[in-house]
Amino acid sequence: MSRIAIPTTEQTPAASLPILEAVGKQLGVVPNLFKVEALSTAALEAHVSLNTAVNKTLDARTRERIALAVAQVNGCDYCLSAHTYLAANVAKLDAAEIAAARQGHSADVKADAAVAFAKKVAELRGQVANADLAAVREAGFSDAQVIEIVANVALNTLTNLVNNVAHTDIDFPVVTARAA
């Protein structure tokens, strides 16, 4: 059960309502995470703005792999559930690839380097070794793309923390960090 109640439309700040409407138009539904974040228009705006920006970076399959790895590191069942659904149904990753991503790996060599690096960024709070940075560069990622990987980690960490604090009610098929 959610520790921060999911607000009704009447309980949602008026400034958040157009943002939620835009999310609903884009996704076809407004996930509970966005409804909880809408309690703070600033937090909702920050999430949506960062999400819009990072969606212009790495390919969707790599972004979903990163989201799964970071959610696993942070023990966020809500995000594991949401991104398992998105990885399978939008990014079209198979079950083996989803399981590998949760562990910071991929069968795709280039994606493996990105996801392994993202996992280390999350685990080590950015204090990665020179060898970690060298490995992601050797896989073909530019320094700009390294920063984009970090931005994806930051976005996912933000949503993981919100959901872990709120215990947001999961509105996707449930996946838990313990099941890895």
Image (cartoon, rainbow, N blue to C red):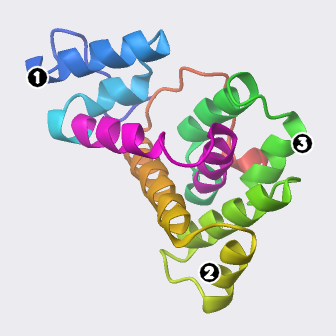
Q: Nearer the viewer, mark 1 or mark 2?
A: 2
Residue 91 in view, yes or no: yes
Q: Tag 1, which secondary structure?
A: helix
Q: Earlier in the sequence, mark 1 or mark 3?
A: 1
Identified at 41% across, 23% down, the residue is 32
The quarter holding residue 45 reads: top left
Q: Position of residue 98 (x, y in %)?
A: 79, 42
Pick the residue in front: 62 or 29. Answer: 62
The quarter holding residue 128 reads: bottom right
Look at mark 3 in the image and give the residue it sits on. Answer: 96
Q: Position of residue 106 (x, y in %)?
A: 82, 54
Position of 36 with respect to 114 (left or right) is left
Position of 157 with respect to 129 (left or right) is left
Amino acid tagged 1 = Ala
Amino acid tagged 3 = Ala
Identified at 54% across, 60% down, the residue is 149
Examine the structure image and report whether residue 101 is included in the region drawn in magenta.
no
Q: Position of residue 62 (x, y in %)?
A: 67, 47
Pick the residue in front: 34 or 27. Answer: 27
Position of 36 with respect to 123 (left or right) is left
CA separation in Å, label 3 and label 2: 26 Å
Q: Position of residue 152 (x, y in %)?
A: 49, 53
For the residue carrying disc 3, how many other residues have a C-alpha within 10 Å: few (<14), some (14-19), or many (20+)?
A: few
Identified at 55% across, 57% down, the residue is 74
* Dot label at residue 15: 1
Look at mark 2 in the image and give the residue it sits on. Answer: 133
Q: Tag 2, which secondary structure?
A: helix
Magenta region: which residues? Answer: 44-70
Query: Number of callouts in the render?
Result: 3
